[in-house]
Image (cartoon, rainbow, N blue to C red):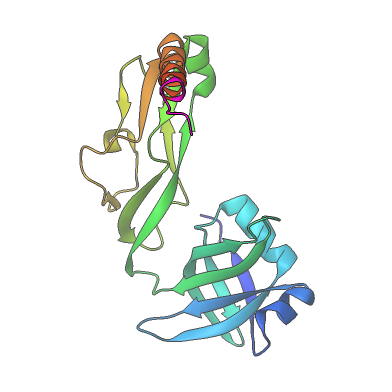
Amino acid sequence: MEEIIIKAMERTEKPNKVRNAGFIPGVLSGPGKTSTSVKFESAVLNKIITKHGANAKLWVVLGDKKQFGFINEVQRHPVEGKIIHISIQLVAENQTVKMHLPINFLGHAELVHKLLQLQVCKSTVEVTGNATIIPDEVVVDVSEKKSGENVTSIDFHLPEGIKTLDPENEIYAIIKAVKEVVEEVVEEKEVVEEAEEIKPAE
């Protein structure tokens, strides 16, 4: 696994001043309630999140210390979408942690070729395990799925020692025929139109 390293600098300024100077304010959270206000170079942090995702595991260098951790919260501007704050949880390399991982569904093209469509019910999964071997995402290949089949934790190929914390019967996606999906949309539209027709005059 690629070792990701980012340099943090201690922060005493207000967040807005930090952003105006081209940095992103953040917090390093250690064991217990200890936390340190820091800032990161905007370009470096954005590159890491773009390439490795918002749950990336990384090494944080602060002063003469190099500590292992993972991103546990990314706050973005509600309109512009740019990162305005980040929180990183520092952990021991062999520490057991809990994380929410994004699910990457592969095989959409093959489903479309078979006139099938993937209906995603849940796009993340909570897992627990050793911090160093938890992946950045869960990859699921749906290309061989058939109409009416579901995607459950059985379809996840997680590293040994990593377990899901969601209910065993949790459904993350459903495979449906394209015709069936279209019919559902039409039915929903009809229900809305009927409701509008019987709506009492004001």
The spot of residue 2 in percent (x, y) is 56, 56
Residue 78 placement: quadrant: bottom right
Queried whether the magenta region covers residue 199, the answer comes back as: yes
Q: What residue span does the magenta drawing correspond to? A: 196-202
The spot of residue 102 in percent (x, y) is 45, 46
The spot of residue 53 in percent (x, y) is 56, 53
Residue 63, compared with residue 176, is above or below; it is: below
Depth order, front residue of 190/90: 190
Residue 160, compared with residue 59, is above or below; it is: above
The spot of residue 166 in percent (x, y) is 26, 48
Residue 15, compared with residue 47, is above or below; it is: below
Q: Residue at x 51, y 78 (%)?
A: 28
Residue 90, compared with residue 151, is above or below; it is: below
Queried whether the magenta region covers residue 129, the answer comes back as: no
Q: Residue at x 51, y 15 (%)?
A: 112
Which secondary structure dominates the residues rendered in magenta?
A: loop
Q: Residue furthest front?
A: 202
Q: Residue furthest bottom?
A: 12
Q: Residue at x 38, y 58 (%)?
A: 99
Q: Residue furthest right?
A: 21
